[in-house]
Amino acid sequence: MSKFCTSLFFLLVFVGLSAQEENKTIDLNRKDSVVYKQPYGLRVGIDLSRPITSFFDEDYTGIEFVGDYRLTQKLYIAGELGNEQKTRRELLSLDGEETAEGELYNFTASGSYIKLGVDYNTYGNWYGEQNMITIGGRYAFSTFSQTVNDYNIYESNRYWNPTGFTPGAEDEREFKGRTASWIEGVVGVKMELFKNLYLGGSIRLGILITNKEKDSDQFTNLFIPGFNKVTENSRFGVGYNYSITYLVPLYKKKKKAEEEPVEESQ
């Protein structure tokens, strides 16, 4: 009889404990206790396209440093600092072909520029990712000179000189103190190759604000360092860069969770 009572007692205890486990509320909205912190700091690097172009094009020399500093989860201060020297030739065709004899003039533009603005990251990274698809803008300023290397005098009457043009002055003439400013819209990407090392690229559309030309009646600005080629009756310029950058992390901040829309109860 005592064995029966003991067995019954343990059975009742087991049933009671099982009932308590079943009555526990199941939390379907448990929060992840792992907190992911994103790095904040200064990212600096160099534009790869300009040294490559300098290597293959004897008429061009340039270098550009790029950088940004993270302000918030999406917003960055960004800028570029560079120097360019570009020699351009304006050719006229003779008998339908461009020849050395048909060169009207050639000149060299040389100077430095700075661009400052912001980038906004539109890309939603997964856990641990630090990639970027950005839209942004810059205010840019350039100071430079233009040197006329040689030129020929254009004559519409080809009777006396049917195979060429009358040479101009042989001495180079430099026009110093040229300045220009513009704003540009920027669309870019940055991809993290390894920890803190990024490969990026951007496309830029610039609109000239000012274009200061001393002695403009003698020679106008045809190439602005940082802006690119200047065409008559147009204030637009197009540019691009391909960058390699390194992030120097200064501190970390908790990543803010994306707010989910609350469904109204029926």
Image (spheres, helix red, strand yellow):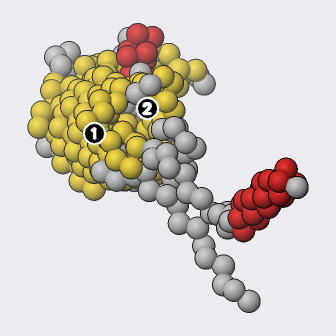
Q: In which image quadrant can residue 62 be found?
A: top left
Residue 90: x percent and y percent? 41, 27
Residue 251's mark? 1
Please give the name of the residue rendered at 34% of the width and 30% of the height, measured from the top-left corner: 247
Residue 212: x percent and y percent? 18, 48
Residue 257: x percent and y percent? 49, 58
Q: Secondary structure at mark 1?
A: strand
Does the rendering let one see residue 223? no
Foreground of the two, 208 or 47: 47
Residue 241's mark? 2
**Relative horizontal placement of residue 77, taking residue 5 as reference (left or right):** left
Please give the name of the residue rendered at 40% of the width and 43% of the height, measured from the top-left corner: 37
Amino acid residing under circle 1: Tyr
Mark 1 crowdedness (10 Å alpha carbons): few <14, some 14-19, many ≥20: few
Q: Which mark is nearer the camera, 2 or 1? A: 1
Quadrant (top left, top right, bottom left, bottom right) of the C terminus: bottom right
**Relative horizontal placement of residue 18, taking residue 121 as reference (left or right):** right
Mark 2 crowdedness (10 Å alpha carbons): few <14, some 14-19, many ≥20: some
**Relative horizontal placement of residue 191, taking residue 6 as reference (left or right):** left
Q: Tell me the CA gap for discs 2 and 1.
A: 28 Å
